[in-house]
Image: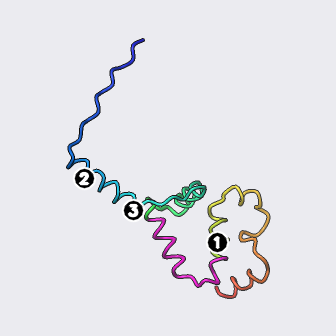
Amino acid sequence: MAEPEKKPKKVLSEEAKKRKRESDRTQARTQINIGRAYTQWRKLKEATGCKTDGDLAFLLLDLFGSLSFSLWSDMEVILRRLVDVSFRQQRFQRSWLHVRKGQRKRLNSSA
């Protein structure tokens, strides 16, 4: 069977090439690489109901910006439980946060 004919590449003018390079540079400035965290990012995006990656980023930045540094570790525990559905299913019999008693007291006393 014969291969379909390939369309010839569109030849861009120097001005068009310059515009494309500038566009690519602008786009590259706003991109980040989250690597292995991609799956967790998608789960968290779905769990929080955020429609775009930018919405989730702003939600997390606002959330962490409002916390003191001492509470970041507690927030990490909460986010991990929110994201990892399989973890919650496996340990259904235990408490939701799975933190040490001292931390649990601090969380309950601050509420």
Q: What whole-number distance in Å separates the C-alpha atoms at marks 3 and 2?
A: 16 Å
Depth order, front residue of 89/15: 15
Q: Is residue 6 left or right of residue 96?
A: left
Can you tell which quarter of the image residue 87 is in? bottom right
Q: Is residue 63 left or right of residue 81?
A: left
Q: Give residue 111's position: percent from left, percent from top.
A: 64, 85
Q: What whole-number distance in Å separates the C-alpha atoms at marks 1 and 2?
A: 42 Å
Q: Is residue 36 left or right of residue 103?
A: left
- Is 36 one of the magenta-colored residues? no
Q: Is residue 111 left or right of residue 89?
A: left
Q: Amino acid at mark 3?
A: Arg
Can you tell which quarter of the image residue 95 is in? bottom right
Nearer mark to the viewer, of 1 and 2: 2
Residue denoted by label 2: 19
Q: Which mark is residue 76?
A: 1
Circles 1 and 2, Cβ within 8 Å, touching? The answer is no
Give the prevailing secondary structure in the magenta stretch: helix
Q: Residue at x 62, y 68 (%)?
A: 79
Q: Within 10 angstroms of label 1, few (less than 14), some, or many (20 or more) residues? A: few
Magenta stretch, residue numbers: 55-73
